[in-house]
Image (cartoon, helix red, strand yellow):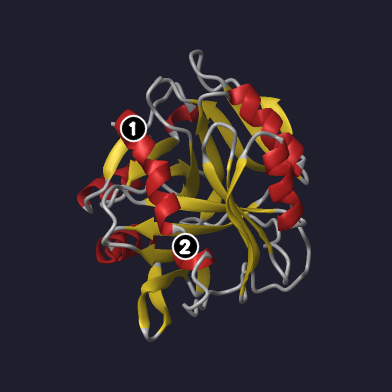
Amino acid sequence: MLRKMLCKAGCALILLMLPMLVGCPSTKIIVPPITESAAKISLPGKFVWFDLFTTDMTAAANFYGALFGWEDRRTNENDASVKTFYHHGKPVANMIGRESIPGDSQWLAYMSVDDVDSALEITEALGGSIHREAKDLPNRGRIGVAVDPQKAAFAMVTSPVGDPLDVKFVFNRWLGCELWTTDVSGASDFYTKLVGYSVNVVDVHEKVQYRLLASQGHRRGGIVEIPWSDAAPEWVPYIAVESILATVTKAQELGGKLLLEPDMSVKQGHIAIIADPAGAIFGIQQLR
């Protein structure tokens, strides 16, 4: 099932949807800032924001609301196609609806960089490509969208108020991202040069290549090899949960699909990958 979900259509779908936020000057988009702390501290390489592009906003709102306690609110009273998810009053993601576009939905991860324009130039120099040129989005900051050399889409942002500080994880909020790719070494080299990650080889399974990404002394994400030849690379965001089994069970009851079930041979069975009812893929990890 995971093999089918990480298909070639996934990247194409999200690239069709992206103009909603970054390519339509006639539409007034109101989004919250990256953080409310206004500490003006930059943490390059940290994943600081996530956008859900979905073909079914109602199903997505009901799913994430029931599973993680996220509340969805309109960003503009006159536009129901863009909403913000909140968790205990804190904004955690945007939801952008495009019901008219066929295919699966997808999460887009935003990586913090010191200078979006410069980072896009570096992306091209390293063999990646620019999908959306740098633009300023009120509150959010300067953003751009790129595709790495293995064709995984990701966004970059430079926030005017700085990045969220590194604090203890909160259940039902983001942990970071994991890149499923066809070239672990190539991807490691690309992102290391782009944002200065330190990369460590991690033994998670005897048949899987895995690299742990860190910056500023904190874990930011990982890179794992896709074990199928016909699957497309994709960044998969992870959410911290208190119980992996309870979350998996509830997700399935709510209409989600279990793509990668907990396996004791991988991180003691504390991770799983799920697709929401509209097809957007995300991971969950049980933490203490």
Quarter occupied by residue 98: bottom left
Q: Is residue 107 left or right of residue 119?
A: left
Q: Position of residue 118 (x, y in %)?
A: 76, 52
Q: Position of residue 212 (x, y in %)?
A: 64, 32
Q: As shown in the figure, which amino acid type bears the numbered disc 1?
A: Leu
The local secondary structure at tag 1 comes to helix
Instruction: Please tell me how many numbered marks the rendered image carries.
Output: 2
Quarter occupied by residue 56: bottom left
Residue located beneath label 1 in the image: 2
Q: Relative to 43, is 94 above or below? A: below
Q: As shown in the figure, which amino acid type bears the numbered disc 2?
A: Pro
Task: Rate crowding at label 2 as few (under 14), some (14 to 19) or many (20 or more) other CA atoms within 10 Å.
Answer: few
Q: Is residue 178 left or right of residue 197?
A: left
Q: Quadrant of the N terminus?
A: top left
Q: Relative to 42, is 238 above or below? A: above
Residue at image location 59% in from the left, 35% down from the top: 222
Residue sitting nearer the eye, 112 or 137? 137
The local secondary structure at tag 2 comes to helix
Q: Is residue 267 left or right of residue 64?
A: right
| Distance from Cα at disc 2 to Cα at disc 1 | 27 Å
Residue at image location 55% in from the left, 47% down from the top: 154
On residue 19, the disc is 2
Residue at image location 47% in from the left, 28% down from the top: 268
Is residue 104 at least partly visible in the picture? yes
Q: Earlier in the sequence, mark 2 or mark 1?
A: 1
Q: Position of residue 248 (x, y in %)?
A: 32, 43
Task: Rate crowding at label 1 as few (under 14), some (14 to 19) or many (20 or more) other CA atoms within 10 Å.
Answer: some
* Front: mark 2 or 1: 2
Q: Position of residue 244 (x, y in %)?
A: 39, 42
